[in-house]
Amino acid sequence: MLINEPDYLTLLTDIKSQIEAARQATVRAMNTGLVVLYWNIGRVIDERSEWGNKFIETLARDIRTAYPDIRGFSVRNLKYMVRFAREYPDLGKVQPLVALLPWASHLVLLDKVRDPLARGWYIEQAAANHWSKRGLMDRVEHQVYERQALPSKTTNFDERLPELQAEQAAETLRDPYLFDFVSYRHGMVEREIENELVRHITEFLIELGTGFAFVGQQYRIEVEGEDFYIDLLFYHIKLRCYIVIELKAGRFKPEYAGKLNFYVSAVDAQVADASDNPTIGLLLCRDKGGLVAEYAFKDINKPIGVSEYQLLETLPELYENLLPSVEDIRTRMSLPEDEEDESWR
């Protein structure tokens, strides 16, 4: 048998790669052909709009009669084809665009995204990250474009990172983050929110975005014999750098920037490899402020940013008593009754 022969295994791997590439090319070609067909049908119907809705109903019935085994030509779908042709009037621009997404995903964008720039961004991101229709819908509903693509984040990346990495980092980090899998209760402290994020690590990673790898919670570093603990440490595959996340339960304060700068410096010196890009720090606050954060970052020498986060504000009554009380949390963390945890852990 040739199964264990290296030459045979190499040959098999090569053939499998070619088969997979051909399959993907076939699917893309079929998808492109189908969507371009829909565009053409929509254009033809739109050019005869004066014939009225009865025309579309008659057309749908006659297509179904001629091709009883083919789906996709209902009255509803024919009307979507008209909308699609109107939204993308230039076929030359349509063909490279529509090849990226299946028809079902285009319907999500037609229904839920009016801004052409936002729609184009979602198409590119959905294709690059292999989002399903459901995944695309979730991101549209969570306004990922507004939070990730628009310049609303407070950072010093442009001043502290090379141009390409600064651009990639700005595209990667969001503002705000929606942690709607964590139920908020008045008086929650940082550690409790942090524990909930880690407990729901799958949802947390999905909200952070593509490329984040979880390294640790309360990650210990030692400096001059003293222990310090980073709230959350990640590594980003695309950016090729560590990302330090510090979580705050309230509004941004200037001293947070200095603490984060210290942690980023320590990770650069003690954790990061020589081949890694500079570590990035991210503060997650319930309220990131405005000029206060901008001034605090101005003379910081490490790349850091601040984003807001939102929690689920209401909790079903059935689960209300299952969460620990504020007093329980304070006891567990040994916090004074009227004091926030502002210490360097």
Image (cartoon, grey):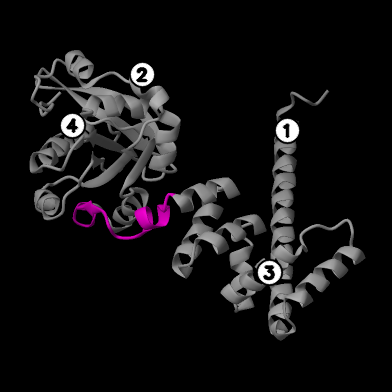
Residue indicated by mark 2:
322
Classify mark 2: helix, strand or loop.
Answer: helix
Q: Quadrant of the N terminus?
A: top right
The numbered mark, 2 or 4, whose residue comes first in the sequence reads 4
Q: CA distance from mark 3 to mark 2?
A: 49 Å
Query: How many numbered circles are shown?
Result: 4
How packed is label 1: few (under 14 Cα within 10 Å), some, or many (20 or more)? few
Which of the two labelled residues, at mark 1 and mark 4, occupies the earlier sequence position?
1
Query: Mark 2 and 1 residues: CB-CB less than 8 Å, in contact?
Result: no
Of the 4 image quadrants, the one containing the C terminus is top left
Q: Is residue 44 above or below residue 79?
A: below
Q: What type is the residue that disc 2 sits on?
A: Leu
The numbered mark at residue 266 is 4
Q: Secondary structure at mark 3?
A: helix
| Residue range corresponding to the magenta coloring | 142-160
Occupied quadrant, residue 55? bottom right
